[in-house]
Amino acid sequence: MKKLLLVLGLAAISVIGFGQEVVKRSDLYQDPSTYLLSQFVIEVEGKTASELKNNVELWASSAFVNTNEVIVAEGDNYIVYKPLLIFYHDAGGLLGQFKNKFTIHTKFEFKENRVRVTLIDMESTYVTPGHPTVSRRIWESNWGEEIKNKGLWKPSFRQMKAAIDKRNNWIKTIEGINFNNSTESSDW
């Protein structure tokens, strides 16, 4: 009986000690060395590069309050937006909700029948009264390669989980662009 209790006790300690949730840098970044959040291709049959670009511009006109504020660069076969996405995470306990910023360099490249999308984490500027202005990326450079959901790292763990959710929602929003719309101007 004592051996059984000892085995169960050791098993419980190992589950508690080693069963911690972990978020890794590679969970957030496709390529952590370049802060690449994601890169993917959307296939669209029967559309020219120009038509695809017009569809993205039409989507951007409703996705952003002012596209001129988020447009970074534009050419015949590409367009780059730099939106500031806001999200919140629960820091736990008495700390409550924290506001986070995610500046995502969103580049669309157009070829016939396809669009390549590249998302890169850029530095966001934080201005807090009484504190120095800080510019940083969402994953702090001094955090290492993983964050465990324990101790003083719990708020950072929750922040990264929320950042991953925000990145995934942004990808779903982009994948949801209706490329089948006619981009010809209507005369209503």
Image (tube, rainbow, N blue to C red):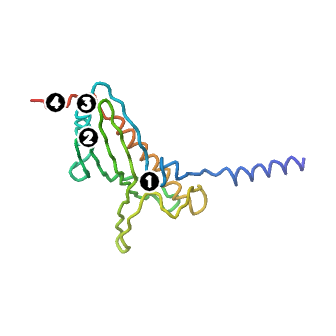
Tag 2 or tag 4, which sits nearer the N-term? 2
Type of residue at label 4?
Answer: Glu
Type of residue at label 3?
Answer: Thr
| Image coordinates for residue 77, horizontal then vertical, percent | 26, 40
Please identify, in this view, whether the residue under mark 2 or under mark 1 is nearer the observer.
Answer: 2
Q: Is residue 114 above or below residue 109?
A: above
Residue identified by numbered label 2: 77
Which residue is nearer to you in this view: 159 or 26?
26
Tag 3 or tag 4, which sits nearer the N-term? 3
Tag 1 or tag 4, which sits nearer the N-term? 1
Type of residue at label 1?
Answer: Tyr
| Image coordinates for residue 84, horizontal then vertical, percent | 33, 53
Distance of label 2 from label 1 (alpha carbons): 24 Å
Q: Residue furthest bottom?
A: 130
Distance of label 4 from label 3 (alpha carbons): 13 Å
Residue identified by numbered label 1: 35
Residue identified by numbered label 4: 184
Question: How many residues crowd mark 3 within 10 Å: few (<14), some (14–19), many (20+)?
Answer: some
Which residue is nearer to you in this view: 118 or 56?
118
Instruction: Give the SS element for disc 4.
Output: loop
Answer with left or right where residue 30 lies relative to residue 75: right
Tag 1 or tag 2, which sits nearer the N-term? 1
Residue identified by numbered label 3: 48
Please identify, in this view, whether the residue under mark 4 or under mark 2 is nearer the observer.
Answer: 2
Instruction: Give the SS element for disc 3.
Output: loop
Instruction: Give the SS element for disc 1.
Output: loop
Type of residue at label 2?
Answer: Asn
